[in-house]
């Protein structure tokens, strides 16, 4: 007799947990406060600030990237504000020179934490261009890493 | 043409306008007429701003003069694979974006050597057969693979009459940041779209000119004043497998 | 007169051994695919010349056989032949199972099998491949509905309509499968409208051969009576389909032989193509057509064992045909410059060789195993097989209608 009740309450508990989980994921801005010390520690990117404010980037970077990828590949639009290459230029790690070669690099730090698989790096380079000729590409003002790169390692 | 490079440097900060485009057209005509092929470093182009999409007013094309193509020279191949990060390997599973093909007429014995690459057809069979639409043609006629939605079915490789496409058979690292490519997707010559979009010519053309062969001419077929348009209008040129009526963007002279 | 359908018992050690063996093969097949997925197609025998290999031989065979397996049901429903009606459930089941096995192989061989969702959400409607995705998915849905009209009283009213629709759909589906090759302008061996009807006839042949084998197998192992009335009808039909397959292959080659431009290709397949020539003459012509026809239309054709052998030979011939069509068609080089001898670093102008790797073959066999596993499981848990198919039971259907 008790068993069906238990199962029911188990189901309710699961649903509640799912709701709670979804809410926690959606409430990104507050999640630093909510979660503990195991939060990913991100290296600071080059430059003053990102191309959008942090909360927007956290929530929408994938949309920006997807939009930009179709614009660039299919229509030949080469603006750099939301380009993946722009991300890599600013966020490549000081240590590894990459955004995704180790678990601590910028992209992987969060994506490992959130357990979200990224498909970018099977094809895209995780490091900024090495050749100076390619670094001299037209870059949008917002993504330009020229402004006060904090380290000497900013080999442009 | 030399002015288009200069135009590009200033053009990237300017909003594109009809007036500017008209100006470009005339200046290209003047410059194009005054140059001999040997000194052309930059092909005639609308100086497209980064924010402006590719337009069907342009149709990128290439003319290959087999009489000038060096027998045994494969600088175009080396330059292409350097530029695009393709390993210089020629095993059966290795991708080749461009290759030198030697042909011999079975009746006359005439021999020719020529580079074979994606022909950037107006009606590309690869685009027709692609189930997801990953195989696509840009407005300016460049045929590309959208690796974001390529599922690696290889139907385009079955369909291409030029054997222009390759599957990436193994994991890749250290790609050129401008040329993303990876395992499991199909790829082919892009006319060096990353260079074309900043008003440079494809790497193969540059290498061919640097060698002094000048066998490859790249430009806008839709611009009647461009050197390529004037040449194909003046001389007999041919499409490979012209019987298929694909209206290729790459044409050949001398075969 | 009603036919009583009953699940098979499936409790014997033999049953579980069979079931476990199939499961193991399926597991090995999937593991092979994961291995390919991890290392890339570098671990296969496929390359930039032979882009479709052994997995496609199995996959296309299974998909073609799937649509053909539904034929038995169609003959009962659409053409009103009552002796076939007791067989319609197994026919629908096999159609679904074979298609599932074939599609599994096809999908797991993709360069980016992890992007199956992309294949299901992005459609280029000019692509016959995209059409096939829709046709395959639709086939599942329609045949499941068809089975429901057979197996549930509530669905009975729709039986004729759904049966007719399923029949038309399967013809379109095999047209689509044939057109995958027929619509390829680039390669000499393909590029022929004949591929669509030829594949339909192949499907009749392969589907029925599989159906006969499975039917006789299940009835023998479960000791259920299976009369000559059913078996001899089916084996005669198989003979007709094999002869028709031969006819289409004959027309295909005679047409190519008439056109001077195809003489190189024909000489390759028919005389100098090594494995392809051997598979064409020995595999397809002798084992696939000549021997089964000789068995089925001689006195041997009255024996169950010989009929089973003929069916198995038809399947072997079918796999040989797929190999010659798919691999042989790619092995012959693309003609870039007609009238010229061509050579390059990219293997232009030379016959391409192919040696399939173990993983490819195991993946293909895995697909076959999945098809049989699904069938075996389904007949154990649902009522697909009539309890009796002896001649009295089947004959009584005639009167009852």
Image (cartoon, coloured by chain):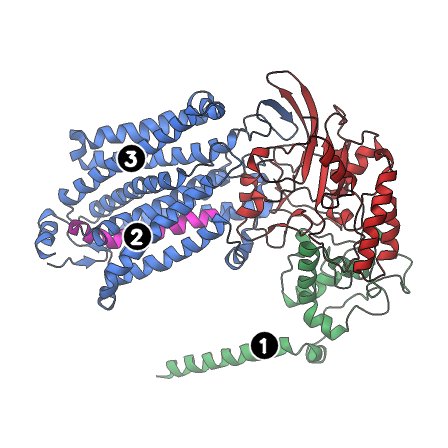
Chain colours: A green, B red, C blue
Q: Main secondary structure of the magenta part?
A: helix
Compared across the picture, whether C348 is left or right of C366 comes to: right
Label total for image = 3
According to the picture, the residue beneath numbered tag 3 turns out to be: C244
According to the picture, the residue beneath numbered tag 2 turns out to be: C167
Q: Nearer the viewer, residue C23 or A133?
A: A133
According to the picture, the residue beneath numbered tag 1 turns out to be: A21
- Name the residue at the top extreme: B108
Residue at the (63%, 55%) spot, across then down: B148
To the question of a shared chain for discs 3 and 2, the answer is yes
| Residue A54 lies within the magenta run | no
What range is drawn magenta here?
Answer: C81-106
Q: Nearer the viewer, mark 1 or mark 2?
A: 2
Whether pointer 1 and pointer 2 mark residues with C-beta atoms closer than 8 Å, the reply is no
Q: Which quadrant of the rendered structure holds the N terminus of chain C?
A: bottom left
Q: Nearer the viewer, residue C236 or C5?
A: C236
Q: Secondary structure at mark 3?
A: helix
* Subunit under mark 2: C
| Residue C94 lies within the magenta run | yes
Q: Nearer the viewer, residue A11 or A76?
A: A76
**What is the x, y in percent for residue C375?**
32, 52
**What is the x, y in percent for residue C73?**
25, 52
């Amino acid at each position: 007799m008790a068993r069906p009740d238990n199962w029911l309450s188990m189901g309710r508990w699961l649903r509640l947990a799912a709701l709670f989980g979804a809410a926690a994921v959606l409430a990104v801005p507050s999640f630093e406060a909510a979660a503990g010390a195991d939060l990913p520690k991100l290296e600071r990117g080059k430059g003053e600030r990102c191309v959008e404010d942090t909360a927007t980037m956290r929530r929408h970077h994938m949309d920006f990237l997807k939009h930009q990828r179709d614009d660039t590949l299919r229509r030949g639009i080469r603006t750099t504000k939301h380009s993946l290459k722009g991300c890599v230029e600013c966020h490549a790690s000081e240590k590894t020179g990459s955004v995704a070669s180790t678990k601590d690099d910028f992209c992987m730090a969060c994506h490992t934490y959130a357990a979200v698989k990224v498909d970018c790096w099977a094809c895209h380079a995780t490091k900024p261009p090495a050749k100076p000729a390619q670094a001299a590409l037209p870059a949008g003002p917002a993504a330009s890493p020229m402004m006060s790169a904090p380290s000497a390692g900013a080999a442009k | 043409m030399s002015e288009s490079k200069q135009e590009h440097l200033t053009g990237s900060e300017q909003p594109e306008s009809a007036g500017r485009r008209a100006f470009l057209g005339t200046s290209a005509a003047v410059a194009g007429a005054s140059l001999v092929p040997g000194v052309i470093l930059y092909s005639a182009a609308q100086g497209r701003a980064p924010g402006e999409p590719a337009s069907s007013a342009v149709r990128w094309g290439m003319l290959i003069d087999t009489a000038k193509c060096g027998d045994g020279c494969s600088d175009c191949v080396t330059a292409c694979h350097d530029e695009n990060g393709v390993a210089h390997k020629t095993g059966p599973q290795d991708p080749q974006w461009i290759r030198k093909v030697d042909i011999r007429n079975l009746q006359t014995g005439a021999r020719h050597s020529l580079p074979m690459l994606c022909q950037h057809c107006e009606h590309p069979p690869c685009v027709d057969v692609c189930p997801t639409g990953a195989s696509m043609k840009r407005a300016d006629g460049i045929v590309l693979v959208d690796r974001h939605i390529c599922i690696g079915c290889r139907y385009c490789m079955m369909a291409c009459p030029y054997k222009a496409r390759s599957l990436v058979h193994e994991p890749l690292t250290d790609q050129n940041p401008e040329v993303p490519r990876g395992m499991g997707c199909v790829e082919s010559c892009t006319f060096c779209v990353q260079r074309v979009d900043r008003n440079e010519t494809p790497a193969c053309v540059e290498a061919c000119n640097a060698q002094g062969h000048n066998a490859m001419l790249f430009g806008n077929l839709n611009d009647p004043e461009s050197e390529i348009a004037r040449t194909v209008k003046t001389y007999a040129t041919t499409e490979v497998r012209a019987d298929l009526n694909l209206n290729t963007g790459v044409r050949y002279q001398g075969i | 007169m009603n036919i009583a359908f009953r699940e098979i018992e499936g409790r014997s050690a033999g049953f579980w051994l069979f079931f476990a063996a199939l499961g193991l093969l399926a597991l090995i097949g999937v593991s092979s695919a994961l291995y390919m997925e991890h290392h890339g197609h570098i671990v296969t025998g496929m390359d930039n010349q032979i882009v479709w290999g052994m997995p496609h031989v199995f996959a296309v065979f299974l998909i073609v056989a799937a649509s053909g397996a539904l034929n038995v049901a169609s003959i009962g429903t659409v053409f009103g032949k009552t002796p076939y009606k007791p067989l319609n459930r197994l026919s629908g089941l096999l159609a679904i199972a074979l298609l599932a096995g074939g599609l599994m192989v096809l999908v797991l061989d993709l360069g980016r099998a992890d992007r199956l969702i992309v294949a299901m959400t992005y459609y280029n409607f000019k692509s016959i491949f995209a059409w096939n995705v829709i046709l395959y998915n639709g086939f599942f849905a329609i045949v499941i509905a068809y089975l429901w009209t057979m197996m549930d009283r509530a669905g009975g009213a729709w039986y004729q309509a759904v049966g007719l629709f399923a029949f038309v759909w399967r013809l379109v589906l095999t047209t689509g499968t044939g057109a995958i090759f027929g619509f390829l302008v680039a390669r000499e061996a393909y590029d022929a409208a004949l591929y669509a009807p030829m594949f339909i006839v192949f499907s009749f042949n392969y589907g029925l051969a599989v159906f006969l084998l499975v039917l006789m197998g299940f009835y023998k192992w479960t000791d259920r009576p299976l009369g000559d009335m059913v078996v001899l009808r089916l084996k005669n039909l198989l003979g007709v389909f094999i002869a028709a397959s031969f006819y289409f292959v004959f027309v295909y080659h005679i047409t190519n032989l008439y056109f001077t431009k195809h003489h190189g290709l024909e000489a390759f397949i028919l005389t100098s193509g090594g494995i392809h020539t051997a598979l064409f003459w020995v595999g397809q012509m002798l084992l696939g057509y000549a021997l089964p026809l000789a068995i089925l239309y001689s006195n041997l054709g009255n024996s169950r064992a010989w009929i089973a052998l003929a069916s198995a030979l038809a399947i072997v011939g079918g796999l040989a045909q797929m190999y010659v069509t798919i691999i042989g068609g790619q092995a012959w080089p693309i003609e870039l410059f007609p009238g010229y001898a061509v050579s390059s670093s990219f293997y232009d102008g030379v016959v391409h060789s192919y040696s399939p790797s173990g993983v490819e073959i195991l993946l293909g066999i895995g697909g076959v195993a999945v098809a049989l596993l699904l069938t075996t499981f389904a007949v154990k848990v649902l009522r697909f097989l009539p309890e009796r198919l002896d001649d009295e039971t089947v004959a009584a259907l005639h009167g009852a209608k």
